[in-house]
C-alpha cells in the first residue's frame, strides 16, 4: 500500500494491548484481560456459539499483516471495523488476526500477533474477545503462520461460508523480494536455489525512489532485525494460495498490485470471488466502516458492494485515484482458452511490442504489470478476436472500475486485469531478466495454462 494520501489521523500508541484499549475508549469495545504481550502461544477458553445445525453461518476474517511500514494505517482499518457494523447474533462471526509494530518503523522489538472476535454481548455492547495470542517472534507473513491461524478458525468456527480480507504490502505474482531488488536476482549473485529462498527471509531493501520506505512486496511483509541485518519475511503467490485450508467464497486484497490475471488464476479453487487492484493502493484502502455490513449484514456476502464502496471513496480524488476489479475465478476457462490461442497466433507481435505503447499499471522502473487486453490490441488482433476476448473477460469479471488517473498513471483503457509483458525482456537489453523468465515459466500457473512465455 502507498502512503500518498492520509485522510485519517493514525491513533497514537501501538504497543500490543494499548491499541485495543484505545479502541475501547472510542468504540466501547470491551477488552479481555488475556490480551497482553506474550512470549508464548496462549489461548482463551472462548465460547461455543454453534447454531442448531452445528455450524455458524458466515465467517468474515480480516488478516492484517502489519509488522511493516503500514502498521498505523492497518490499525485505522481495525478501528473503523469496530466502529462499523457488528453482528448482533452469534450466527455470523467477525474475526481479526493482527500483528503490528510497537511504533512507526520500529522493527527491533518483536510483538505478538492476536486473533480476536468482534461481537455484541447480551447488553448490545461491542466486545473484542481474544481467542489466541501468538508468540512475539511469529511472523504473520509466513505461509506456516497463516495456515495455522486459518486452520484454527476453520476448526473452531465450522461454517457455511468463509471469506477473507487480506491487508498488507504486496506485489502481485512476482517472486518475493524481486520488486524491490531485481538486481539481486539477475546479477548472478544468487548463490542459493529458489527452494532455499522459499523458506528464508530476504534482505530488506527500501525503494530509493520512494522516501519513507514505501515498498511493496510479493504477498505480505514482516520486517525483522536479525543481528545486524534488516530482513523481510514474505510469501509467494503459490505459498499464499496453498496456505489457505478452507474454501473461501471471497478473498479481498487490500494490498498493492494484486489485480493480475496471474493472481486470479492461482486462486482458482481456493476462492470463488477475488477483489484486487491492478495498481498500487492508497493507504486508506477499503471502507472498513461499511465492509462488515456488506459481507455479514445480508443473507449472502456482497463483495461487489465492497468494491463499489471502495471506488466511491476515490472517484472524485484528483490527486490519488483507484482501480478495482472483482473476478469470478470459477469462470476463467474461456479466458484461458482465448488467450492461449491469441498468444500463439500473435507471439512474434507480442514479443516485439514497445512497452511504452501498452497501457501500464506500474510506476517507476518496475515494468511487470500491463493491461491484458491492451497487450493483445497493440499486438494487432482483429475486431472479431477483440470481441471474443472481451466476451471472455466479461464472463469472469463481475465488476471493474478506475479513475482516469492513479497518481502519475493515466488510463486510456482499463480491462480490469494486468499481465506480464514478455517484450520487456527484449526491449530493456541493459537489464537481465533471466531469473524472472525462468520463474514465470516454472512457478506461474497462468503461464503453464496459456504458454505466454516460452
Image: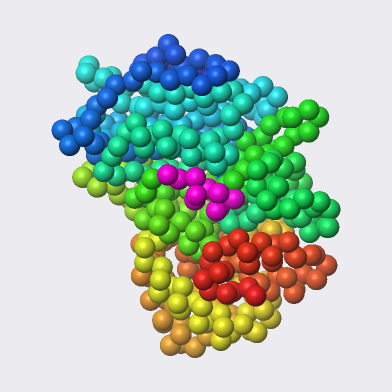
Residue 103 among those drawn in magenta? no
Q: Quadrant of the C terminus?
A: bottom right
Q: Is residue 410 visible?
A: no
183 left or right of 106 in image: right
Taking depth in this image into account, of 197 and 117 the one nearest to the observer is: 197
Q: Please, is residue 453 above or below residue 296 in the view?
A: below
- Which residues, given as a range, are shown in magenta? 236-245
Q: Please, is residue 234 above or below residue 238 in the view?
A: above
> What residue sits 41% from the left and 33% below the top?
152
Q: Is residue 127 visible?
A: yes
Percent coordinates x, y for residue 26 in the rendering: 40, 20
Residue 238 among those drawn in magenta? yes
> What residue sits 54% from the left and 38% below the top?
144
Q: How is the image coloured?
A: rainbow
- Residue pushed farthest top? 33
> What residue sits 48% from the left and 25% below the top?
114
Taking depth in this image into account, of 314 and 175 the one nearest to the observer is: 175
Amino acid at each position: 500500500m502507498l502512503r500518498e494520501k492520509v485522510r485519517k489521523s493514525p491513533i497514537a500508541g501501538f504497543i500490543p494491548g494499548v491499541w485495543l484499549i484505545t479502541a475501547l475508549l472510542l468504540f466501547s469495545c470491551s477488552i479481555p484481560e488475556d490480551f497482553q504481550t506474550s512470549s508464548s502461544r496462549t489461548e482463551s477458553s472462548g465460547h461455543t456459539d454453534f447454531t442448531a445445525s452445528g455450524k455458524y453461518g458466515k465467517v468474515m476474517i480480516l488478516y492484517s499483516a502489519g509488522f511493516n511500514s503500514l502498521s498505523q494505517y492497518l490499525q485505522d482499518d481495525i478501528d473503523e471495523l469496530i466502529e462499523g457494523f457488528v453482528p448482533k447474533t452469534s450466527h455470523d462471526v467477525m474475526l481479526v488476526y493482527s500483528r503490528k509494530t510497537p511504533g512507526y518503523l520500529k522493527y527491533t522489538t518483536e510483538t505478538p500477533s492476536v486473533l480476536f472476535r468482534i461481537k455484541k454481548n447480551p447488553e448490545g455492547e461491542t466486545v473484542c474477545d481474544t481467542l489466541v495470542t501468538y508468540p512475539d517472534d511469529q511472523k504473520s507473513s509466513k505461509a506456516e503462520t497463516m495456515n495455522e491461524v486459518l486452520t484454527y478458525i476453520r476448526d473452531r468456527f465450522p461454517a457455511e461460508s468463509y471469506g477473507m480480507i487480506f491487508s498488507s504490502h504486496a506485489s502481485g505474482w512476482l517472486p518475493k523480494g524481486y520488486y524491490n531488488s531485481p538486481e539481486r536476482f539477475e546479477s548472478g549473485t544468487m548463490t542459493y536455489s529458489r527452494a532455499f529462498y522459499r523458506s528464508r527471509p530476504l534482505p530488506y531493501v527500501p525503494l530509493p525512489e520512494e522516501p519513507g520506505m514505501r515498498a511493496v512486496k510479493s504477498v505480505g511483509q514482516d520486517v525483522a532485525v536479525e543481528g545486524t541485518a534488516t530482513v523481510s519475511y514474505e510469501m509467494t503467490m503459490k505459498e499464499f494460495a496453498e496456505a489457505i485450508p478452507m474454501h473461501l467464497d471471497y478473498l479481498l486484497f487490500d494490498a498493492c498490485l494484486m489485480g493480475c490475471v496471474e493472481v486470479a488464476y492461482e486462486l482458482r479453487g481456493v476462492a470463488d470471488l477475488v477483489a484486487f487492484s491492478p495498481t498500487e493502493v492508497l493507504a486508506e484502502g477499503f471502507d472498513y466502516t461499511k465492509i462488515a455490513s456488506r459481507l455479514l449484514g445480508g443473507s449472502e456476502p456482497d463483495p461487489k458492494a465492497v468494491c463499489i464502496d471502495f471506488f466511491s471513496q476515490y472517484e472524485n480524488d484528483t490527486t490519488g485515484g483507484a482501480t478495482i476489479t472483482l473476478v469470478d475465478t470459477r469462470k476463467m476457462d474461456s479466458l484461458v482458452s482465448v488467450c492461449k490461442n491469441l498468444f500463439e497466433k500473435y507471439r512474434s507481435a507480442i514479443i516485439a511490442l514497445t512497452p511504452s505503447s501498452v497501457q501500464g499499471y506500474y510506476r517507476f522502473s518496475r515494468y511487470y504489470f500491463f493491461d491484458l487486453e491492451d497487450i493483445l490490441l497493440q499486438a494487432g488482433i482483429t475486431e472479431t478476436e477483440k470481441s471474443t476476448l472481451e466476451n471472455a473477460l466479461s464472463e469472469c469479471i463481475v465488476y471493474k472500475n478506475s479513475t482516469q488517473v492513479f497518481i502519475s498513471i493515466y488510463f486510456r483503457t482499463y480491462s480490469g486485469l494486468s499481465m506480464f509483458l514478455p517484450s520487456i525482456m527484449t526491449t530493456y537489453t541493459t537489464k537481465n531478466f533471466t531469473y524472472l523468465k525462468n520463474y514465470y515459466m516454472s512457478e506461474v500457473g497462468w503461464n503453464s495454462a496459456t504458454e505466454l512465455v516460452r
